[in-house]
Amino acid sequence: MDENNDRGWNPYLAGALTGIVSTLSLWVSGKYFGASTTFVRTAGMIEKSIDPERVGTMAYFIKEAPKIDWQWMFVLGVFFGSLIASTTSGSFHWKALPDMWQARFGPSRSRRALAAVVGGIIAMFGARLADGCPSGHGLSGTMQMAISGFIALACFFLGGMLVARLLYGGGGKQ
């Protein structure tokens, strides 16, 4: 698909709907958005099926029990919501990685996949190190008018722009 012919939702509409859903989440369940803990809990559930005694003694999993909870269902809802949005807008298509990645990392699928996995590991490590992810610190933090949320959000944008510049060098639009 041509990236200039994107038929996806208007980002302002998506942002407004995210704000409404976030407000409803707080109002109905008393919970702010967050996602990164879900991945760790899922890893704990998988490990628990192999070695339950080990998981039962780990300090992190004593604090954050590996279970399906509201946040786990939230992440599942993000997946299905994205699927519904992309199919209804006609922008859904199967694609392992964007064309931009192929231009940057070459035709090797394994090299591009390795770059994506390493990036995901770094992002998850940072999220766990900070005890939260961009949605937790950025979206939920700013909803609470927390200074730390605004600082985190500014750092996410700056970090994202820096890494994008390093990886893509302006995306060929010079």
Image: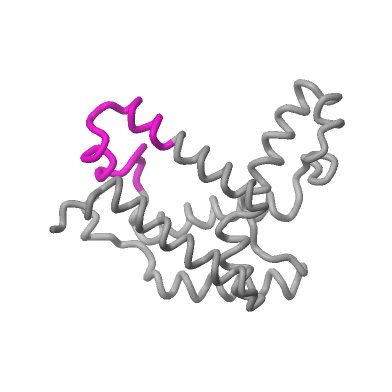
Magenta span contains residue 83 = no
Work out whether 142 lies above or below 57.
below
Q: Is residue 123 above or below residue 96?
A: below
Residue 108 part of the magenta-drawn span: yes
Report x, y in % for residue 60: 78, 40
Is 38 left or right of 84, judged from the image as shown?
right
Counting the numbered discs, the total is 0
Instruction: Check the picture and name the quadrant holding the C terminus.
Output: bottom left
Residue appearing at x 16%, y 52% in the figure: 172
**Residue for point 54% across, 50% down:** 79
Q: Measuring from the top left, give residue 48's x and y in whole percent.
A: 78, 28
Q: Residue at x 30, y 44 (%)?
A: 98
Q: Nearer the viewer, residue 159 or 124?
A: 159
Chain part drawn in magenta = 93-116
Residue situated furthest left in the rendering: 174
The residue sitting at 82% across, 25% down in the picture is: 54
